[in-house]
Amino acid sequence: MVSIKEVAKRAGVAISTVSKVLNGYPNISEETKVRVNEAIRELNYIPNSIASALSSKQFGRIALILDPKRQTQAIDQVFMQYLLGALDKAKELNLEVVTIFTSMIAGMDAEEVTRYFLSQSIAGVVIYGMSKEDKVLQKLIEEQRFACVVVDAPIVNARTTAVGVDHEQAQYDVAKKTITDDGCKRVLYIAGRKDGYVTEQRLKGMKRLAEEMNLSVLVRQGDFSELAARKIALKYARNKDCVVCASDLMAIGAMNALIDMDIFRPVCGFDGITLMGYVGKQMNTIRQDFYAISSRALVEAKLLLDGGTGHSVVMPHSIVKMYYKDIIC
Amino acid sequence: MVSIKEVAKRAGVAISTVSKVLNGYPNISEETKVRVNEAIRELNYIPNSIASALSSKQFGRIALILDPKRQTQAIDQVFMQYLLGALDKAKELNLEVVTIFTSMIAGMDAEEVTRYFLSQSIAGVVIYGMSKEDKVLQKLIEEQRFACVVVDAPIVNARTTAVGVDHEQAQYDVAKKTITDDGCKRVLYIAGRKDGYVTEQRLKGMKRLAEEMNLSVLVRQGDFSELAARKIALKYARNKDCVVCASDLMAIGAMNALIDMDIFRPVCGFDGITLMGYVGKQMNTIRQDFYAISSRALVEAKLLLDGGTGHSVVMPHSIVKMYYKDIIC
DNA sequence: CTGTTAGCGCGTTCAA
DNA sequence: TTGAACGCGCTAACAG
């Protein structure tokens, strides 16, 4: 392992000079810069990020916390987008990132998790899809020892930034489009899990619309499960005009139920996952750009690490109509 | 950040003594061991893994290399299982792991990738689902600078271990079951992508069976795509007795085609992904335990890092019949 | 503009 | 059985 020392010797300069060249400091003559770079190339020198981190006390990796307990096929796809967005941006920002599944910290209390994170040099965390029941992560956020970015949960404090789309408005938008397109009056709304922060926001959006448009809305908990949504639709959809679902996966379940019942009702989902390809029908849905959201989450994490204050970031969303043929290819 | 120094002071011993206690050295009296541990607890001391790594020169993280270009819904699910298995095992083995998507190293040549990895203190890599066309990763493997574990590709050298199920035998097994159950003679085989190592192995298994049972087999490239498989089935399935697919996703496509054509043919897949839930029918498939495979891959990576020699590890597979209702819940 | 010096937090000799 | 001292590879003042 060739070190900075040998580069310095080779270039005939001091170690610190090499370091300065490496880190793009000013006040280095073009000439020595060239000489150093030459030596670096000749020796095939590769800076040791470990030593660099130790010396500069720039620990501060960022943990990406994913919860695979909530496992459904759709979620996998979402998580992959989250990961991709985060890792790409991390590389761009030169941040070290650690992927953590909640199963790895299951059973630990907040203090143990804190110790574990610190031992891993983790200074910031990005939490994806936190549940209201997750007391440990909640506490971590409250304690403000780590810079936190929470995706899809409206939690903000001095060291916590929230990133995500406006779920209330989005639900309002997509439901409105579906309902006005077909002149519906009686709506079956299949909501998500009670322990999810987005569930109530989306429900709020639906209720606001119902009031504005004077609709009757039947609300049932679908728990983000395809099967649950299927059952609910089988039971209640017949004398409703349309089915609004708080997730794409539930929309698929509802739509399949409608097909089995041999009746047509407009359905709308929420997420814009390509899994929709399996539906074989078309439907309105909200498109969230999970990649962009996660990308932004990393940026916000860095801001917090650099001393910024927590705040709320609202990402844009759009309404799309998804078709079978568009997607499968 | 409380350091080893303060612990030493608190316990009234030297730094080196604390270090020895920490790392379980012999030749430490019970008494001082207790005193040190007490101090550690009282101060809430957390060893700094960065400094530790630097000092002991134990770099050697392991990169998990995933290729999201090959993106299909099913693959996401597989990748998540891979990740979970790897991360869990890494924690158990106390290995540091870095998740890398090929998009992050796209455009780099082998040398650049090597430098990038070295700068990240990466000493071993686990490559999931490598393509034959991936010259850069191929070269990395050939150069043997890193300890490599290749999942689902039969590549072995002194520093490369291959881990995965026996794809040939597995394809043989599942096809045989499907075919004998229904007494089929004319088989439509929908193969995977040409650039995948497993494609030819599975095809070989199919051909061996065909010879043994004197079957006629029509082979078509489905490229692991649901849509492609659908089209192939629409075109060729009518005058075949069954459809054998090299992946579950293609099996779904084929099955949907059969439903649309309103004919029944036994179908079999390969993978055992729960995405099968969407089929709404039943089918035979090979079940690969992606979690276990990835777990094992990590173990093998550690063995290589510890000086072991590359070899081939065959993981068990089984045949399962998957139903709609089993899975969705 | 460049070199000297002092650590970062820890592991590891080698004396004591 | 313990501790002082050195060094891992690098950054960051400070002096020149």
Image: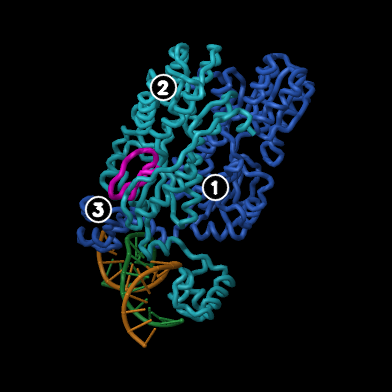
Chain colours: A cyan, B blue, C green, D orange
On residue B101, the disc is 1
Q: Is residue B25 left or right of residue A44?
A: left
Q: Position of residue B71 (x, y in %)?
A: 59, 39
For the residues labelled 3 and 1, the Cα–Cα distance comes to 39 Å
- Compared with B197, A205 (above or below) is above
Comes first in the chain, label 3 or label 1: 3
Q: Quadrant of residue B234?
A: top right
Determine which residue is flagged by label 2.
Answer: A189
Magenta segment boundaries in residue numbering: A146-163
- Compared with B202, A21 (above or below) is below
Say if mark 3 contacts mark 1, CB within 8 Å: no
Query: Which residue is at the front of the view, A42 or A151?
Result: A151
Residue at horizontal 52%, vertical 20%?
A255
Number of numbered labels in the structure image: 3
Q: Is B8 included in the stretch rendered in magenta?
A: no
Query: Which residue is at the front of the view, A25 or B327?
Result: A25
Numbered disc in front, either 2 or 1: 2
Determine which residue is flagged by label 3.
Answer: B40
Q: Position of residue B236 (x, y in %)?
A: 76, 23
- Compared with A208, A156 (above or below) is below
Q: Is residue B277 left or right of residue B17?
A: right
- Local SS, label 2: strand
